[in-house]
Image: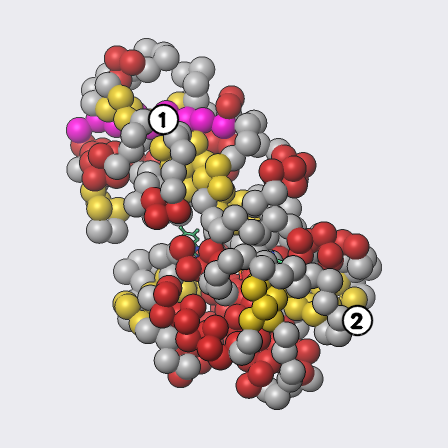
């Protein structure tokens, strides 16, 4: 998302652009996503829900997103929903294939299966984070067991490594990630959305030892619960549901629909600990990691910063490589990639 946007905008501003895509197709994780590009409706909600995030970057995303979405539409990107369907948020849902295709056309020639992080000249790092590198995940996020990947397979921290090599500082939130609790079994990329078990807030949640480990209320995004699950024994949890819980709706599905999609749903009698009264079904879940939240430290012009705050000449980062925007919570990764992608191109061209 960030790379195609940055390339399209840079060409629009008259720059010569070489686009490198390490994978065998364009679109990265954006192509696999639900493609809802959104911001919190209220600025205070953004700060409140991502309290340790970089407020300057959050402000840029929040203020520029509506115009950025209009820019996507001006390129011909196909809108599927005019609203997000969530009263807390504003934004639009795009068709991911249509969006990738429109952006790829606007980005110009793309060199496929090519690592772009050793490029010369002004370089915009947008490799999508480090969730695909199990060693980096173990080092920085330190889950209790390896996490299954719920993202494109090529985002393996190349941008972060290049940034660090050139003296970049790390952003806030390097130990955080965005993900979904999924059935604790292997899954394909066409099951990333349908398999998500997004009802932890209606369940009793236990770890394998039978402890109810999550304290307080689970947030609407459930990203707090997913991250807490990563630190439980074997990075697993059990969602235990009664009849009332099964009737709740989350967007277009009921909880019962989501349970039906889980291959790890069992009779509560088969739990490794005593089932709570009224339990109807139990689902064993583990976190699928979608993208890292921390990464390279950038300023509000997408310039890569050293630990002392000075910019690294000619080096920019956007998307999940530009860390710290959603630290402490969860915010739209596509919105951040879109806005910082535009900003990086505009800074590199001298337009801002
Ligand atoms: C199932 C799913 C649902 C999601 N739903 C939503 C949603 O509804 N709303 C939302 O806001 N977000 C959603 N997301 C998250 C969203 O997709 C990401 O936040 C967004 O794609 C991040 O943009 P990016 O440009 O940083 O990374 P990507 O879009 O993943 O792009 C990174 C690209 O870099 C390439 N790359 C990696 N290394 C190199 C290298 N060395 N050289 C060259 N290229 C390289 C990768 O192959 C990839 O094409 C979802 C993600 C998934 C997987």
Q: Which residue is mark 1?
A: 284
Judge whether residue 56 can be spotted in this image.
Answer: no
> Residue 219 falls in which quadrant of the image?
top left
Residue 100 part of the magenta segment: no
Identify the residue shown where x is 45% and y is 26%.
Answer: 236
Residue 241 part of the magenta segment: yes
As measured in the structure, the alpha-carbon distance from the residue carrying label 2 to the one carrying label 1 is 48 Å
Query: Dot 2: within a 10 Å radius of its alpha carbon, few (fewer than 14), some, or many (20 or more) residues?
Result: few
Q: Quadrant of the C terminus?
A: bottom right
Image x and y of residue 229, in percent? 47, 31
Identify the residue shown where x is 43% and y is 18%.
Answer: 208
Query: Dot 1: within a 10 Å radius of its alpha carbon, few (fewer than 14), some, or many (20 or more) residues?
Result: many
Residue nearest the viewer, comparing 198 with 139: 139
Cβ atoms under marks 2 and 1 closer than 8 Å: no
Residue nearest the viewer, comparing 8 with 71: 8
Q: Which residue is mark 2?
A: 313
What colour scheme governs how the chains and residues are painted in the rendered image of this protein?
Answer: secondary structure
Judge whether residue 7 can be spotted in this image.
Answer: yes
Identify the residue shown where x is 33% and y is 66%.
Answer: 95
Q: Secondary structure at mark 1?
A: strand
Image x and y of residue 251, in percent? 25, 51
Q: Secondary structure at mark 2?
A: strand
Q: Which region of the structure is painted magenta?
A: 235-243
In the depicted structure, whether residue 116 falls above or below residue 292: below
> Residue 139 falls in which quadrant of the image?
top right
Disc on the earlier residue, 2 or 1: 1
Left/right placement of residue 326 relative to residue 283 reads right
Image x and y of residue 212, in percent? 41, 23
Image x and y of residue 175, in percent? 62, 42
In the depicted structure, whether residue 209 falls above or below residue 7: above
Residue nearest the viewer, comparing 303 with 205: 303
Identify the residue shown where x is 43% and y is 22%.
Answer: 207
């Amino acid at each position: 998302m960030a790379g195609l946007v940055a390339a399209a905008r840079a060409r629009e501003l008259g720059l010569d652009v070489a686009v490198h895509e390490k994978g065998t197709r364009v679109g990265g994780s954006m192509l696999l996503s639900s493609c809802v590009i959104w911001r919190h409706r209220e600025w205070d909600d953004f700060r409140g829900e991502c309290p340790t995030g970089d407020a300057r970057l959050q402000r840029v995303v929040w203020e520029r997103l509506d115009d950025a979405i209009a820019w996507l539409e001006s390129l011909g990107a196909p809108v599927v929903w005019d609203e997000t369907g969530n009263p807390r948020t504003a934004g639009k849902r795009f068709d991911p294939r249509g969006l990738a295709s429109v952006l790829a056309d606007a980005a110009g020639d793309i060199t496929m299966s090519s690592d772009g992080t050793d490029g010369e000249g002004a370089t915009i790092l947008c490799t999508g984070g480090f969730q695909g590198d199990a060693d980096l995940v173990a080092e920085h996020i330190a889950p209790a067991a390896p996490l299954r990947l719920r993202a494109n397979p090529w985002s393996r921290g190349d941008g972060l490594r290049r940034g660090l090599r050139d003296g970049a500082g790390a952003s806030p939130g390097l130990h955080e990630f965005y993900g979904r609790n999924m059935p604790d079994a292997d899954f394909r990329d066409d099951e990333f959305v349908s398999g998500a078990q997004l009802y932890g807030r209606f369940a009793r949640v236990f770890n394998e030892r039978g402890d109810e480990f999550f304290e307080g209320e689970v947030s609407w995004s459930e990203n707090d619960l997913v991250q807490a699950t990563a630190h439980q024994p074997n990075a697993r949890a059990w969602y235990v549901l009664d009849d009332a819980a099964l009737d709740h709706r989350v967007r277009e599905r009921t909880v019962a629909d989501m349970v039906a999609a889980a291959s790890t749903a069992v009779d509560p009698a088969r739990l490794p600990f005593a089932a709570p009264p009224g339990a109807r079904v139990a689902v064993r879940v583990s976190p699928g990691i979608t993208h890292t939240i921390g990464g390279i430290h950038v300023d509000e012009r997408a310039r890569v910063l050293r630990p002392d705050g000075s910019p690294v000449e000619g080096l920019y980062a956007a998307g999940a490589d530009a860390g710290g925007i959603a630290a402490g919570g969860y915010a739209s990764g596509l919105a951040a990639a879109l806005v910082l992608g535009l900003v990086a191109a505009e800074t590199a061209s001298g337009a801002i």
